[in-house]
Amino acid sequence: MHMIRKAVVGGAAVACLTALFLPGTASATGDHSSDAGIPADTQILSNDEYVAQFGVQRALAEGVPLPTDAAGAPVSPPDPSIPSYRVNWSALDWDGYDIPTRQGNNDFGAHHAATKHNMRSKKAINAPYNGKADRVRGTRAEYDGVVTSGGSVKMTITSIAERGEKGPGGVTTPDGRPIGTVTGFCRGQTLWP
């Protein structure tokens, strides 16, 4: 059983931004691209974007890691009518890597992020990709981002992408593009609010 915990940011407990998403905005088998329920003053940014917008001093004060050189709920079955390799949307990171977010299955893609971590928003999954990878291990790249309100960091998020054509469980892509998004999640919490 998954439990939603309170995140402590800047010394204050934040109740996981429960108003950020409305229950039932996306199904576990659907397109997973709903951004409904995100308040207008909420921004979801990569760490690089946060530093560019608010500056190094504020990033340090808010605990946002500074950009580095990239070189240096129960799971329901996927909808059989939607192939796991279907690309729901795509992104390019600042190094030009193609990152498709595929429908996926229990092991990767939008389906995995939605059912395992409640990360159902295209905006939340893609925002960390708008920067350079924070960690690269082989063909696996991890990208961090932040959710802010008025410039104050409310939570940190991570999206993980597979840059190769072979993904979890030996799944390969029929279109020659990378597997792309493996998962997206909120740091320090089991489920995205």
Image (cartoon, rainbow, N blue to C red):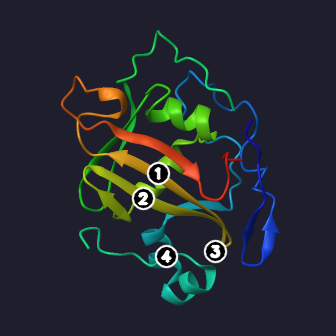
Say whether residue 10 is left or right of residue 52.
right
First of labels 1, 3 by sequence position? 3
Residue drawn where x is 67% and y is 47% of the image: 190
Label 1: how many residues lie within 10 Å, few (<14), some (14-19) or many (20+)? many
Label 1 is placed on what type of residue? Ser
Q: Is residue 34 visible?
A: no
3D distance between C-alphas at marks 1 and 3? 21 Å
Identify residue for label 2. Answer: 143
Residue 13 coordinates in the image, percent (x, y) = 81, 68
Q: Secondary structure at mark 3?
A: loop
First of labels 2, 4 by sequence position? 4
Asked if disc 1 and disc 3 are in contact, CB closer than 8 Å, the reply is no
Tell which residue pokes out farthest to the top in this image.
81
Picture disc at residue 65: 4
First of labels 3, 2 by sequence position? 2
Residue drawn where x is 68% and y is 72% of the image: 150
3D distance between C-alphas at marks 4 and 3? 15 Å
